[in-house]
Image: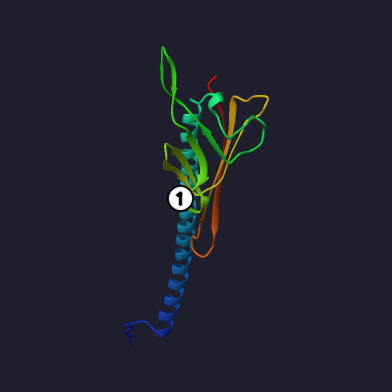
Amino acid sequence: MKKNNRGFTLLEIIIVVFLFSIISAAIFSVLATGRNSLSAGESQIGVQQACRNGLDAMIKELRQASVSTIQGVPADGANYSSITFQIPTTIDATGITWSSNIQYALSGLNSAQLLKTQSGSQKVLANNISALSFNRSAVNPNVVNISITAQKNTFPGFTARQSTITLVSQVKLRN
């Protein structure tokens, strides 16, 4: 006699559903970890880019400044939170014409923005800045040391991650 099997038993269906659930949970776990890593990486890149943009803008203008135009950062080796200086706008036979005062300082929204102030107008150069310092030494007063720190908190998934970067640079001033 030939037996005719046309279907699955309840036990077979329960086992298949259970195995499928385990495999789905493992795949979801791997995808969630990847998404969290991507989010943290994007946050770190954003913080680094903001910090680099701010530092590059300051360096570009400070290189044009003269030692005699630096204000607010005496050559005493101490750290200062802002710097004010002037850069040449024209140089001709009659001499040098200097710009209005340019100031870089940490201010703005929650005091976490790098601001450039010139002629009464402010420009935001970078966000998420947590520390900014300038100093000059008595031994080498024509070099300005700059330290800028950017920091951002992200919340991928259920964990908080903090992305922090500090960039340090030295700028040699004009004579």
Where, by quadrant of the figure, is residue 170 drawn?
top right
Q: Is residue 68 left or right of residue 60?
A: right
Q: Looking at the image, which residue is at 44% across and 31% down?
A: 100
- The crowd level at tag 1 (other Cα within 10 Å; few <14, some 14-19, many 20+) is some
Q: Nearer the viewer, residue 89 or 127?
A: 89
Q: Looking at the image, which residue is at 50% across and 54% down?
A: 110
Q: Which residue is mark 1?
A: 42
Q: Is residue 150 left or right of residue 124?
A: right
Q: Position of residue 27 (x, y in %)?
A: 45, 64
Q: Residue furthest bottom?
A: 1
**Quadrant that contains the N terminus:** bottom left
Q: Looking at the image, which residue is at 37% across and 82% down?
A: 8
Q: Looking at the image, which residue is at 47% across and 52% down?
A: 109
Q: Position of residue 14 (x, y in %)?
A: 43, 80
Give the image's coloring scheme.
rainbow
In this rendering, is residue 52 above or below 173? below
The amino acid type, in three-letter code, at marker 1 is: Glu
Kind of element beneath mark 1: helix
Q: Nearer the viewer, residue 9 or 23?
A: 23
In this rendering, is residue 24 above or below 84? below
Q: Position of residue 146 (x, y in %)?
A: 57, 35
**Quadrant that contains the C terminus:** top right
In this rendering, is residue 31 above or below 167? below
Q: Nearer the viewer, residue 94 or 169?
A: 94
Q: Is residue 144 left or right of residue 127?
A: right
Q: Nearer the viewer, residue 67 or 139?
A: 67
In this rendering, is residue 32 above or below 114? below
Q: Position of residue 168 (x, y in %)?
A: 58, 36
